[in-house]
Image (tube, rainbow, N blue to C red):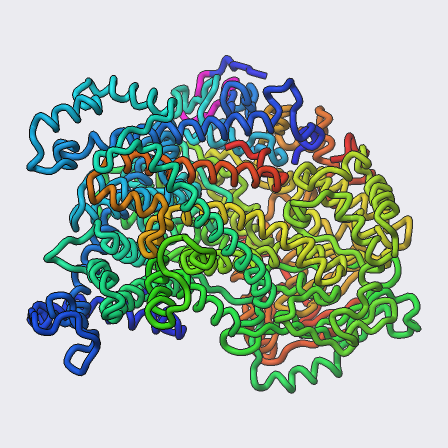
Amino acid sequence: MRRWMRVLRTPLGLAATVLTVGVLVLAVVAPMLWSDEADAVDTSNILAGPSGDHWAGTDNLGRDIFFRTLVATRLSVELALAATAIAVVAGLILGGASFLLGRRSGRIVSAGINIAVAFPGILLALFFAVIFGVGATGAVLAIGFAGAPTMGRLTQTLVASVEARDYVAAARVAGVGRVRILVRHVLPNIAEPLVVNATIGAGGALLSFAGLSFLGLGVQQPKYDWGRLLFDGVGSIYVNPAAALAPGIAVLLAGLAFNLFGESVATSLGLSSAAGVPLRADDEDEGNGSLTTEGQPATSSDDTGSDLVLDVRDLRVTFPGPSGPIRAVRGVTFSVRRGEAVGVVGESGSGKSLTALAVSQLVDDTGRVEASRLELLGTDLRTGGPKAHRHLLGTSLAMVFQDPMTSFNPTRKMGGQLAEVARHHQGMDRKQALARAVDRLRAVRIPDAEKRAKQYPHEFSGGMRQRAMIGMGVMGNPALIVADEPTTALDVTVQQQVLELLRSIREADDVALILISHDVTVVGEVCDRVLVMYAGKIVEDLPAEGLATIAKHPYTRALVAAVPDMDTDLVRPLAVVPGRPVDPSEVPPGCAFAARCPLADDHCREVEPPLATVADGSRVACWHAGEPLALDEGTGELVEAEAR
Amino acid sequence: MTLASSLAPATPRVGFTSHPWVRFGVRRLGRLLVSLWVLVTASFLMIHLIPGDPVRAALGPTAPAALVKSKRAEMGLDDPILVQYWHYFQHLFTGDLGTSLVSRLPVSDIVSQRLPATLQLALLAFLVAVAVAVPVGVLVGVLTRRGHGRRTELTFTTGSVVLGTIPDFLIGVGLVYVFGVNLQYLPVAGNETADAYILPVLSLAIGPAAIMSRIVRVEMVSVLQADFIRTARAKRLPSLNIYLGHALPNALTASLTLGGLFLSAMVAGTVLVENVFAWPGLGSAIVSSILNKDYQVVQAIVLIYGSGVLLVNTSVDVALALLDPRSTIRED
Amino acid sequence: MSTRTANPVTSSELRFEDVTVRYGGARRSFTAVDGVSLTVPQGAVVGLVGESGCGKSTLARAAVGLAPLHSGQILLGGEPVPHRGRRRPLQMVFQDPYSSLDPRMSIGESIAEAIPPGMSRAERRAEVERLLELVHLDPGRSRVLPSALSGGQRQRVALARALAGQPQVVIADEITSALDVSIQGAVLNLVRELQRELGLSMLFISHNLAVVRYVASHVAVMYQGRIVEQGPVAEVLVDPQHDYTRELLAAVPGARSTPPTPRSTP
């Protein structure tokens, strides 16, 4: 209910709601108030134009058209609602039938609906009008049945989408009967979209009715709806145009009201906002604090920078949110040397993907990317507009995205998509670029590369697509590959091939790698160094081989202990971190991990720990870094341990 | 993807009849034929589902019984229904659509006289609608991609929803009022002169153009958010390349289906618009025939309209299959 | 690989005998499961591993009646698994925590729906609370909607719902694959605990060998619709006999000592 109230917040929704309510009220009230005026015959004043007495003039019997238009609201609305009801009920039966009847018969019903849906409503309406006869009843049935196939198709689609959900399967497995599933599970979940579409359908029915009556096939004398008034009015349009305009405007307003109302509800029922962290008033000080005491990245303190491929300092990504700016990345500092592999580990809401996107300048322009330093191969990426650094980014930086299935343009051949890079950034012509593309496909071990280049993306398997993606990245000579969950969607054996490919490319050309993943074991195996992110900040930066041994942040240690590998102790429970990952729009003050941390105290909850360099060169953001933890054998939760 | 499935060829090549294109063609043709059969049967049944005697209803209560009887025999209405059904098919194949009860003319003459006017109107309106809707939709789509142009989006959506909701005959009446009654500038009846086409075509085209441009915009916005557009941006291609080369083809394939629906909707819209502008086409004929209970004419026109719609849908499916490389592979 | 043991069938042993499942019509049929024989002994957790498309989910769905059996039989305690009626001794927990619960039913109602008929309303309510406690959720929250729970909590509700049907065997189809890493542990610990305390028999399907090693006592490896190897976990994962098993083991991150030699490039 509350979500429907959201409609009133938009100006369009508000207008539509007011209008719709107005029409409905008028439908009820008008005949009660103005029937007499509407029926008053005055043969001395036929077909008069608009005047003070008769705002829209009179018809061929001297009756006041304005009042007739108002009174006609009831019949017009009633008929439209009746027709919609027929359409919805018939549609429900048709759509529900294919669910209840099972495969065979369901498919026949489905085929029938598909054929009927192909015919436009007016044709079906005319067809039924012939059978049911001219007049209001006939027209209601006609429009009702004409709308049934569309409603049936809609119901069917909605039912099918609910049927595919696991909770319906679970109910079937539990032995719940089909009818009960339909009533208890399917109907409540399709009710909302159905009602919205029925509202829009009511608007359509209203307009169709006006059309039918306008043709003379709908409401007949002495009854009158707007369409009938139009029919009469058009006949005398040269003498008294208002006779047609008044009902015309009425039809328009009512139809608009229903349609707009339905549309506004549909839009407001599907809102969502970007994830992020809200600003707080005292964050200014926090921000400054973290800047000055931010530990220098272990590797870059004395570097002249010639060895640095990427240098990032205090990276922040902000999105506009419903209640103030949302900060998804809250000050990230790290650097990557030539040939180095850096892993970024985190769960949902950690900001790891956005960090990668921000570094590659691929964040949507609704988001704001700020940093006190952001240099790729010594070039400051912050300067210049969107077109700046195009060449640099196009050739020295390669991106590999998560979902190989959707990362390529389905309507263009693979070879061409790779060749584009060479044509735009390396000055090659079409032939040269294609040749280079085939060469790169070969380099990423895609068999039959020439033939494959002429194929479309859907003809490649997932693993092959990821290789092609990597191939696209090495069209130039990248110094850095940024891979965002490149193997998450792949099988483990295929994952191995792709990771191996990345390794060999890195070895061959000394290419640096940023590998983002939620899988600690993958990152631990592939990377030299690991950055652990939580709630938009780096909480630990340590060498990969130290993950299991020298990790000091409780979150890192929990992550490592929570994931079983082939050597996990089978006797003890897996580590469990109570609570859930922080929702980026609701980050508490102080250390974001405090709520789930066994070592947290009041200081942790008030003051955010800076990322500080520790003796062994790694960096940790924790007030209790390194304090011993133990595993509660019963619950699996990490708890404070006695100091040894 | 398993190892084996990734090695298997995408389309199995075992002989001519299992080629996906042939299978698709056969499937589509089959569906068309079945739909046509359903249409013919429906139009046949239409007369027989009417309560009462159609001939009596057409000739009026005062017509002599003998005339009614002879007319019924002439139309074969006393034969068993299956025989009538068979005769109906036979007549269709020979092009005999019956005789008008009102004008005594062969229906096929009436139809062939009026069909061109309706076709011209529908096709012109479609072309106008597409020529306006696609560029506008694409442009506004780019302007209102995620997070941008909120105000433009609001104005455009409101405008297109309002224009799209107004039924074609109302637009027609409004245009008649403005140009016919007030300005007396353009002809509002018949199709005698070239400028007589303007108002009817506009009436028919405005609504669909508004709705179509809205859909094209939505498709464009949704395509611009797709992963492969992010890949194109990662390749640092110029914006124009991304919009026209990558986004547009994908947005169009989705809009094409709807374009086809619009054409068939426009074919149907001629029914109303022709009546507003006294256009000598099938639309005005069918209404007067229904009112006059001249059922054979109604039957024939329903058949023509229906077949037209089915043909358009089939062409759209074929065009889609040709344009989208993935579509034939998906066999439903 | 069909072996009929001479041992008498125990009352809640789940047995697949030469099961084949096919999709598609006569011309384009695709064999998803090809002659699979597998046993889940009473009180044991048997892991079923394989990569996408190997047929493990199809096998599970065939067991609970969601996919049609082409040939072979699936027996529970010697009798074919019932696919009709209110009493279903074989229950299933699904992968997607966001799709496995009806968003419009409270979690208490979802669980109660699976309880076999024959209890009074009060008994039903008590049973729901008992089940919630069993999966370490607050019984006072039975009126809460799924949208208020995390993914891990939802999976636990789904587990409770499966247990509500008083099953003899539960099939868990990739139940932790869609969960955040820090939450996975809770669900896995729960599975082990239920097996220990209730003697719950389970067929645990996963693509993750390390997870299967942690919860199961036996494991079967599936590839392209067939079981290529099965046996006690300690044996199969330490000394694999089949090439594919070896490849799978070698591909597990963090576990290899020698680089893998790819059989073929995907």
Q: Provide residue A78's location: percent of width, then percent of height.
A: 18, 58
Quadrant position of residue B327: top right
Looking at this view, name the residue that lies furthest to the front. Answer: B192
Height in image: B332 above or below A378?
Answer: above
Q: Provide residue A166's location: percent of width, then percent of height.
A: 44, 43
Q: Is residue B304 left or right of residue C56?
A: left
Q: Is residue C72 left or right of residue C48?
A: left
Quarter the C terminus of chain A occupies: bottom right
Q: Provide residue A519's location: percent of width, then percent of height.
A: 67, 52
Q: Is residue A365 magenta?
A: no
Q: Is residue B131 left or right of residue A308?
A: left
Q: Is residue C254 left or right of residue C212?
A: right
Quadrant position of residue B288: top left
Height in image: B203 above or below A160?
Answer: below
**Residue drawn at x 20%, y 42% as measured from the top left:** B292
Q: Is residue C128 visible?
A: no
Quarter the N terminus of chain A occupies: bottom left
Q: Nearer the viewer, residue A13 or A400?
A: A13
Height in image: A71 above or below B230?
Answer: below
Q: Is residue C59 visible?
A: yes
**Residue drawn at x 22%, y 24% as measured from the top left:** B75
- Which segment did they paint magenta? C8-19
Q: Provide residue C240's location: percent of width, then percent of height.
A: 71, 28
